[in-house]
Amino acid sequence: MECTVNWLPASGMAFGAETGSGHLVTMDGAPDGGGRNLAPRPMELLLAGAGGCTAYDVVLILKRGRHDVRGCQVKLSAERASADPKVFTRIQMHFVVTGRGLPATAVERAIAMSHEKYCSATIMLGKTASVEVTHEVVEG
């Protein structure tokens, strides 16, 4: 996996990233740090990436189990250390999984498998943060 990140000096403290798969992402800082608040912060993208990683796993696991999954939302909140390096110290994830006839046990199992075996991002972040997971299953 590769990524190239370039500072965009004309924009203050914004950075452009080009991923190995050829996609572009812009990041920016807060105005009090010289940024212009024109894009997500790098740590916000890290949190979003963890949410995307685990949601991907959950949907894939449920689909492979031939469950009729129709939606998967993960609401995340995180706390960071007050001193540098300001690592994540606590991450809360709430899954809302929608489907037809989805057994709660299948959703619980998919989430557990993601967090214990497959989701590289949350497993890695779990080295500095407690990761708390809740979920609900919605018929639809």
Image (cartoon, rainbow, N blue to C red):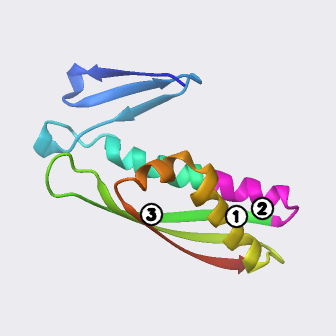
Residue named by callout 1? 110
Front one among 137 and 27: 137
* Residue 63, numbered label: none
Name the secondary structure under disc 2: helix
Q: How crowded is mark 1: few (under 14 residues within 10 Å), some or many (20 or more)?
A: many
Residue named by callout 2? 62
Residue named by callout 3? 76
Give, as a three-letter code, the residue at label 3. Answer: Leu
Q: Residue at x 38, y 32 (%)?
A: 26
Give the magenta part as a residue range. Answer: 55-68
Name the secondary structure under disc 1: helix
Front one among 53 and 97: 53
Give, as a three-letter code, the residue at label 2. Answer: Leu
Q: Residues within 10 Å of mark 3 (few under 14, many from 20)?
A: some
Front one among 128 and 86: 128
Give the distance between the C-alpha atoms of the residues marked 3 and 1, in whole angstroms.
18 Å
Q: Which residue is drawn at 84% across and 55% down?
A: 64
Q: Which residue is drawn at 42% across and 51% down?
A: 125
x, y (%) of residue 131? Answer: 44, 65
Predominant SS of the magenta segment: helix
